[in-house]
Amino acid sequence: MTAKIISGIEIAKQITEEIRREVAELKTCHGIVPGLATILVGDDPASHVYVGSKVKTCQNLGIHSERYNLPGSTSEAELQALLGKLNNDPQINGILVQMPVPKHIDETKIIFAINPAKDVDGFHPTSVGRMLIGEPSFLPCTPHGIQVLLERSNINPDGAEVVVVGRSNIVGKPIANILLQKAKYANATVTICHSATRDITDHTRRADILIAAMGKPHFITADMVKDGAVVIDVGTNEIGKTPDGKRILVGDVDFPAVKENAGAITPVPGGVGPMTIIMLMSNTVKAAKMAAGLI
Ligand code: NAP
């Protein structure tokens, strides 16, 4: 069997067009322009690329964007002050602080300082708590993107055995929680594996849907995957550069081998990655509608 390839590029394109229409309608019918502020502290080249793509996507969709590039020497108090200003700025509906921040800044305090009504990254404890108890909230972008990928590929996790490898706060824990909820395109039986799990293969081979989010290139090999399983590869690992300086990225899954026995699989790049930015845009539009009392 050769797996169906789930294209995040194609699905993200469909959602982009839906959001473009929604943004245009908000402007025409309600005079609302959603606004996203991005904050980057320091000079990390990869972070610059990520923020650049977010700003470009905003522009492409008609979303107002404000970009704050702060020097690496910015103090925690200065960053808090900027957040305070943006928290009260009616033109800004979503605030994104690009992580990681420099070591002298406490990441948790910064996440806590974002107004939960503008928490489009979905990392504030209010969002996390609401997600946990199944209340409407801003879902974190990568895990929400995975759920939407499944939904738009007609793969329903309802009743399925889902195994997540990785328990980070940004991917592993939230995707496990989202798919556990008694809700549409969720309602799965979920197992989470991590570095202290005794026999990972024992778990992964039971998975109807296997989600790899570890940051270990090609860790998931074909013998770890049940025939016909759906494999979602979140891993984005740089293993070198092309002669012209482009990053060579691979996932956590040994794609060439696993695609021969999986039922469906996401590639890297072009799988989960493109979904993350579009879910951020979707959260920004949602925040704008909430601020205007439309939802
Ligand atoms: P992370 O914070 O480093 O967490 C990695 C998780 O994997 C940890 O829970 C760790 O276990 C577990 N792990 C590591 N080695 C393991 C092993 N040998 N066996 C079992 N579990 C192991 O990483 P992350 O932020 O979740 O990101 C994971 C990957 O996804 C990275 O490649 C990242 O670049 C990628 N990513 C992609 C997107 C996207 O938009 N496509 C977004 C976010 C992340 P412990 O908790 O026990 O240490």
Image (cartoon, grey):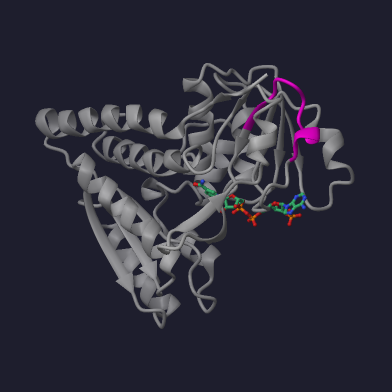
**Left or right side of 131 for 254:** right
**In the image, farthest residue toward the right:** 198
Q: Quadrant of residue 76?
A: bottom left
Residue 65 in picture, x, y percent from top left = 23, 53
**Residue located 33% across and 36% down the image:** 286
Magenta stretch, residue numbers: 221-231
Q: Quadrant of residue 114?
A: bottom left
Residue 60 in picture, x, y percent from top left = 22, 43
**In the image, farthest residue toward the front:** 243
Q: Nearer the viewer, residue 65 or 52?
A: 52
Residue 70 in picture, x, y percent from top left = 33, 74
| Vertical side of 45 occupied by 115: above or below | above
Q: Quadrant location of the C terminus?
A: top left
**Residue located 87% across and 34% down the image:** 202
Q: Nearer the viewer, residue 4 or 17?
A: 4
Q: Is residue 63 visible?
A: no
**Residue located 54% across and 25% down the image:** 150
Q: Nearer the viewer, residue 222 or 215?
A: 222
**In the image, farthest residue toward the bottom:** 73
Q: Is residue 165 visible?
A: yes
Residue 184 in picture, x, y percent from top left = 54, 18
**Left or right side of 123 for 274:** left
**Residue located 21% across and 47% down the image:** 59
143 magenta-colored = no
